Image (cartoon, rainbow, N blue to C red):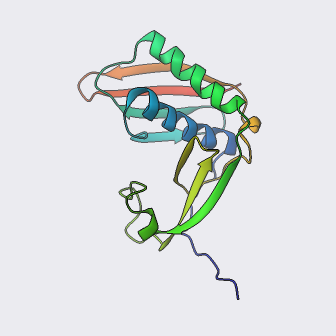
Amino acid sequence: MEQQIQLNEHNKTEYPPMHTTEHIVNQTMIRLFGCGRSISAHIERKKGKLDYRLESCPTPQEIEQLEKKVNEVIASHLPVTTEYITQEEARGRFDLERLPADASETVRVVKVGDYDECLCIGLHVANTSEIGTFKIISQDWDETTKRWRIRFKLL
């Protein structure tokens, strides 16, 4: 008899193209800036906002490079797949700090081709070709907290 996988309840409904884009932006930030995944995210159907901890504000050229790289990944038509593993298997492979204290023993890994993988229970597209074009619409820097915020939309 096949085991039924039990995940935590999920209390929000993401717009799959925007949510999948969040994954791609996070991995691109890691690769370009050596930072971690976003420290705060607010993703809606029409626009999204992501905050990152950085040592300094990105230059206009770096921001352009980020936008270009995200769009290259989207245009690569990567499959978006899921895998279920135990928290023990996830330890050392993923940051488990954001898991709720009562998280199920089984966790879901979402993979964007071979570009990104992370723990997530949200909704995603099946292929990056379903996303559209990523556009940063504004950004700001907080020198005191070393927080960089981008706002984006999909065209």
Looking at the image, residue 155 lies above or below residue 17: above
- Please identify the quadrant where the C terminus is shown: top right
Give left or right: position of 35 versus 45: left
When the figure is inspected, residue 44 is found, relative to residue 118, above or below; the finding is: above
Q: Residue 47: horizontal and vertical position, in percent? A: 60, 31
Q: Extreme top residue here?
A: 60
Residue 132's x, y, as percent?
Answer: 73, 30
Q: Residue at x 39, y 59 (%)?
A: 96
Left or right, 110 with reference to 92? right
Instruction: Tell me which corner region of the image, top left, top right, bottom left or bottom right, holds residue 93.
Output: bottom left
Q: Quadrant of residue 40?
A: top left
Residue 105, given in percent of the width and then of the height, sits at 47, 74
Q: Residue at x 60, y 50 (%)?
A: 111
Left/right placement of residue 147 relative to residue 22 reads left
Above or below, comparing residue 77 to residue 154 in the picture: below
**What is the residue that sits farthest to the front in this orientation?**
114
Q: Quadrant of the N terminus?
A: bottom right
Q: Residue furthest bottom?
A: 1
Q: Can the viewer see residue 97?
A: yes
The residue drawn where x is 72% and y is 35% is: 131
Which residue is rendered at x = 67% and y = 32% of the image? 74
Q: Which residue lies most toward the right here?
A: 130
The answer to whether residue 11 is seen in the rendering is no
Count of marks, rendered view:
0
- Residue 91 locus on image (x, y percent): 39, 63
